Image (cartoon, rainbow, N blue to C red):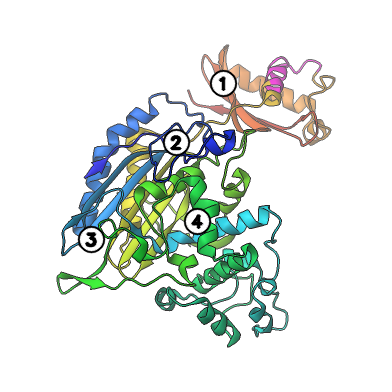
């Protein structure tokens, strides 16, 4: 089945404005505009074009589930803070033939990690910890940790958040620790740990490190990390159906985990919640998790607007930055076969990837015995995808790449346009008044002190006049296209040729032109 939903507010407007909170269990969608400022996109028909592609998206997910023997799959498409489509195929419970819906509750494994780091950042923003604090300040057993070398730095909270603490990759082992008690974790650390690297020098995926982050949240907040995250993050977001312990999920909504073995599905027993839940224990639905994705989308673009819970926009953007280099996939290809190298890094509980065309993806995969999942948002495009499956390590990477690439290509999506700053507009106007002869340019006051020493006025005049001669009469001056608030370009359209004009300003106030390049471009 599939379901198309209206915008939802994440219940934040009432928190900002002091209005009464919705009653428990009230999930009626309301306007999201209070805390989500729609990005500036050039195409006013953008959303309609995206909706036109959704039948293709549904087919991609349906075919992926069938091809890979998934008992069930749920998916969602989030655009500009709206869950515009949610659907499901197959069963959450094969024996009972319980159909998957957008409300079905799946264990999302390592997709839980960014929720843990969001809680850490909230505590940081409240002044209760620092990311560069040695982790032993909150986990005393780490103080006796034997490091590999005498010059190793102490493991910090930030190291744990970015998989750079020096612990070995531990996916096979870590997946089976989910229900360990807090005492089990403490005893493990106290008994001594093995390191694979000195802290801070290499990326290596560590579930143990995120279990430690859960312990730090518990220590600093004074309550179990699950309770703190429920209260500080999920409640403001309206994620009222998200749980940690599977026995607390409604039986008719809980997805059972399976393996595909000997051409049949075999039950994979669910693990109880425990100290490792901070690395991969969350159980949630497409409808609930879309609220979390919408909050991440709402961090962009940076703006002067009231903050809303649960975290400052700047801290959400901080989560999404590439903190630890992970991989260069020189041979990466999109599912349609298009080659496009991609570089990847790890943020705070999030993966960050950028392809050869400059597209940035932020999200995470998840995999446990019985389950597999993945979500991505594309901050500059305002779109996101999420998919859950109830098969062991169900791979969602290829289908999510295909869906995003299809949305962008078929709908003709372009990244968000940056509004030009007033100083860029001013400098463009002033520059045009001087061209092509540069009369009184030296006295104009718009050029930085390096400008004419770098290239003389006479040389600049000759270059520009030669280009104007090739272009013929200038019949149109194009719109200013900013790269940021102090750098941009525009096009001079001539009768026989065009001229690209690029300029960048200094950090002074007022900002002056420090670099100016002219280039002939074909019509």
Please name the residue that numbered disc 4 is placed on.
Answer: 230
Query: Which stretch did the figure color magenta?
Result: 426-440
Which circle, 4 or 3, is nearer the viewer?
Answer: 4
Q: Residue 104 in the image: state x and y as whole percent.
A: 29, 53
Label 2's element? loop
Work out how far the residue at label 1 is from the one at label 3, CA to CA, in angstroms: 50 Å
Please name the residue that numbered disc 3 is placed on.
Answer: 70
Toward which corner of the image does residue 520 lie, by quadrant? top right
Work out how far the residue at label 2 is from the one at label 1, CA to CA, in angstroms: 26 Å
* Magenta-colored stretch includes residue 381: no
Q: Residue 199 in the image: state x and y as whole percent.
A: 64, 73
Toward which corner of the image does residue 441 lie, by quadrant? top right
Dot 3, how many residues are within 10 Å of its Cα: few (below 14), some (14-19), or many (20+)? Answer: many
Lower sequence index among marks 1 and 4: 4
Please name the residue that numbered disc 2 is placed on.
Answer: 80
Of 49 and 334, nearer the camera is 49
In the visual, does 340 lie left or right of 406? right
Q: Are marks 2 and 1 in contact (CB under 8 Å)?
A: no
Quarter of the picture containing the N terminus is top left
| Res 19 seen here | yes
Label 1's element? loop
Q: Are marks 3 and 2 in contact (CB under 8 Å)?
A: no
């Amino acid at each position: 089945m599939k379901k198309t939903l209206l915008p939802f507010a994440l219940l934040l407007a009432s928190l900002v404005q002091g209005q009464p909170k919705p009653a428990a269990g009230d999930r009626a969608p309301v306007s999201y505009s209070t805390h989500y400022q729609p990005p500036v996109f050039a195409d006013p028909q953008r959303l309609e074009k995206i909706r036109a592609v959704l039948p293709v998206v549904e087919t991609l997910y349906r075919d992926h589930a069938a091809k890979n023997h998934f008992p069930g799959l749920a998916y969602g498409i989030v655009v500009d803070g709206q869950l515009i489509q949610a659907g499901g195929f197959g069963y959450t419970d094969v024996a009972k033939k319980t159909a998957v819906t957008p409300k079905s509750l799946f264990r999302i494994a390592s997709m839980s990690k960014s929720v843990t780091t969001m809680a850490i950042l909230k505590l940081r923003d409240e002044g209760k910890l620092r990311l560069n604090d040695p982790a032993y300040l909150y986990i005393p057993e780490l103080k006796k940790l034997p490091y590999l070398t005498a010059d190793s730095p102490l493991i910090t909270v930030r190291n744990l958040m970015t998989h750079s603490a020096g612990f070995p990759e531990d996916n096979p082992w870590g997946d089976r620790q989910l229900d360990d008690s807090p005492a089990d974790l403490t005893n493990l650390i106290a008994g001594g740990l093995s390191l694979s690297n000195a802290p801070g020098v290499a990326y290596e995926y560590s579930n143990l490190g995120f279990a430690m982050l859960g312990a730090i949240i518990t220590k600093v907040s004074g309550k179990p990390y699950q309770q703190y995250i429920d209260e500080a993050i999920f409640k403001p977001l309206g994620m009222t159906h998200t749980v940690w312990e599977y026995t607390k999920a409604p039986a008719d909504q809980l997805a059972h985990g399976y393996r595909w073995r000997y051409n049949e599905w075999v039950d994979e027993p669910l693990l109880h919640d425990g100290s490792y839940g901070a690395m991969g224990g969350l159980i949630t639905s497409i409808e609930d998790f879309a609220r979390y994705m919408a909050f991440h989308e709402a961090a962009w673009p940076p703006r002067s607007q009231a903050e809303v819970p649960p975290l400052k926009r700047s801290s959400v953007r901080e989560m999404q930055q590439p903190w630890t280099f992970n991989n260069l996939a020189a041979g990466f290809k999109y599912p349609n076969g298009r080659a496009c190298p991609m570089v990847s890094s790890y943020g705070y509980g999030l993966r960050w990837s950028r392809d050869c065309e400059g597209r940035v993806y932020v999200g995470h995969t998840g995999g446990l015995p019985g389950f597999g999942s993945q979500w991505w948002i594309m901050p500059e495009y305002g779109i996101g995808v999420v998919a859950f499956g109830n098969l062991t390590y169900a791979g969602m990477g290829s289908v999510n790449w295909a869906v995003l690439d299809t949305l962008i290509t078929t709908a003709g999506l372009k990244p968000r346009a940056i509004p030009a700053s007033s100083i860029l507009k001013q400098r463009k106007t002033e520059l045009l008044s001087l061209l092509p002869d540069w009369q009184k340019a030296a006295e104009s006051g718009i050029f930085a002190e390096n400008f004419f020493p770098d290239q003389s006025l006479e040389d600049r005049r000759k270059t520009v006049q030669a280009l104007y001669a090739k272009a013929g009469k200038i019949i149109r001056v194009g719109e200013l296209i900013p790269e940021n608030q102090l750098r941009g370009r525009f096009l001079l359209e001539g009768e026989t040729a065009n001229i690209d004009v690029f300029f960048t300003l200094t950090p002074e106030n007022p900002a002056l032109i420090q670099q100016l390049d002219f280039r002939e471009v074909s019509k």
